[in-house]
Amino acid sequence: MYALWERARGRRASAALLPLILLLALWPVAVSAHAFLDTSNPTANAVVATSPSEIKMEFTERIVPSASSAQLYNADAVKVATPASHIGATAYELILPLPPNLPKGTYTVQWQNVSADDGHPNNGYFAFTIGTQSNIVLPSPPPAPALNTAIVSLASISRWLSLLGLAGLIGSLLIWRWVIVPAIAELTEPNQRRIARNIRRFAYASIAVAVVGSILIAVAQARTSGGVNLGSLWTILGQSRFGRLLLLGDALLLVLAAILWRPNFWSRSTGWRTRWFELLIIALAPLPDALNSHAAAIGDGAQSAVTTDWLHLVAASVWIGGLLTLVIGLVLVRSLSLEHRRGVYAEAIPRFSTIAIIATITLGVTGFYAAWLEVGNLDALLHTTYGHTLIVKLVTIVPLLALGAVNLLVVGPAMRRGVKYVHHFGRIVAAEAVLGVTIFAIVGVLTGLPTAREVVTFSSGHPAYSYN
């Protein structure tokens, strides 16, 4: 019997180590979060004596041929007819052939692409002049390329669903074990089973939401590459680091689903080895998302950036997923009397508040570090789309923190003295959960944008105009 136990324990340890080994194999390398224009010939703002035969552009990432193109405009933003652009000698190059003997003057080259490494779209333009310094004029910006709002919306929604599902799963697992089980200890067995059933259903629903989000992410990536078919999906999922991490994240979700399926997970007494195994898988679950985030594209220091982003995801999932778990598991259970609710809430509030305070501190520290890496300065915060979106996120967090403080400092202590504040607790937690879901929606938009630091760096480091 002891030998069987040792073999079983060894299998559990191997199962826990396998995802970690795979994640380490996919640890960040030097990549960019979007395919920016790195160099061009002629260079941006160059003056060339004669009309070149072509414009050669090299980007920071490989680009998708079917979703990448360039056009030529004159100084009045009128499009100049040219042969179609095409991929150059490498997947990083885009070539725009030019008609012979273009008149002297200033021209702009408008480009747009989709990164073959992470599926992110990008666009911009730069100017050059044929002739001499006397031929230089300030060109009118060419019209911005049409933005496929359906694809952008699908990408944002898919990332939101993926993050929300992951948070719901992590929150339900941890809050059930460390908050709700002790809080419902004095309830009758039927009420305990009812609460456990609600949370179990919520956990499985969270897995389903996360998997749907993952599928939609792959579909959105395929659509940016030109179309959704088995070939494009296989290219994304099977032949890119992004896709392999997406599949690994789904595999970790399935491991967590198997943990939930075990009847003894929902029992009140489990061994410490089982609890540590559960915590390990829960901690690993957000790591694929961190490895596919902006943090992985930092370059030097990417390891520390990914670690910070991973901790940020874990803390956000515990906090917001925990709020959703409290709503589903306690607030929406109608079979409890007010007195029973008061007892359960009074026990749950300090336990959850301890976890929430730790998560909030972690979010503050990691969020400040991530903002420094991805924004860098006030000018980038105030003058980029990424910065504006980040400001909206920070503004939304303020009432969430305020409501949490009210529950901790006012409602919790008052509830121990009577049932008057029971309904207040439920309403406040529900409002916190709604704000948390909103924050994840904002993060879904943020993850699809080039960071403010990237935009500022490529705008100042390269004398070119950009739409970002």
Image: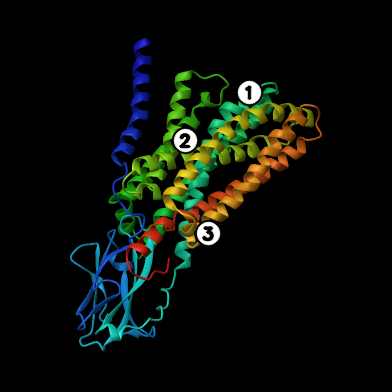
- Residue 106 image offset from top left, x and y in percent: 31, 82
Q: CA distance from mark 3 to mark 1?
A: 42 Å
User: From this viewpoint, which residue is outermost toward the left?
Assistant: 89
Determine which residue is flagged by label 2: 257
Residue at 49% over, 46% down: 163
Up the image or down, 60 lies above or below 16; here it is below
Amino acid residing under circle 3: His
Mark closer to the observer (2, 1): 1
Instruction: Looking at the image, tell me whether mark 3 or mark 1 is earlier in sequence order.
Output: 1
Quadrant containing the C terminus in the rendered view: bottom left
Q: CA distance from mark 2 to mark 3?
A: 37 Å
- Residue 345 image offset from top left, x and y in percent: 70, 30
Q: Is residue 197 left or right of residue 1?
A: right
Determine which residue is flagged by label 1: 182
Q: Tell me which colouring the rendered structure shows.
A: rainbow
Instruction: Looking at the image, tell me whether mark 2 or mark 3 is earlier in sequence order.
Output: 2
Determine which residue is flagged by label 3: 388
Asked whether 352 or 388 is in front, the reply is 388
Q: How dense is the environment of label 3, judged by Cα within 10 Å: few (below 14), some, or many (20 and up)?
A: some
Q: Secondary structure at mark 3?
A: helix
Q: Residue 181 is drawn in which quadrant? A: top right
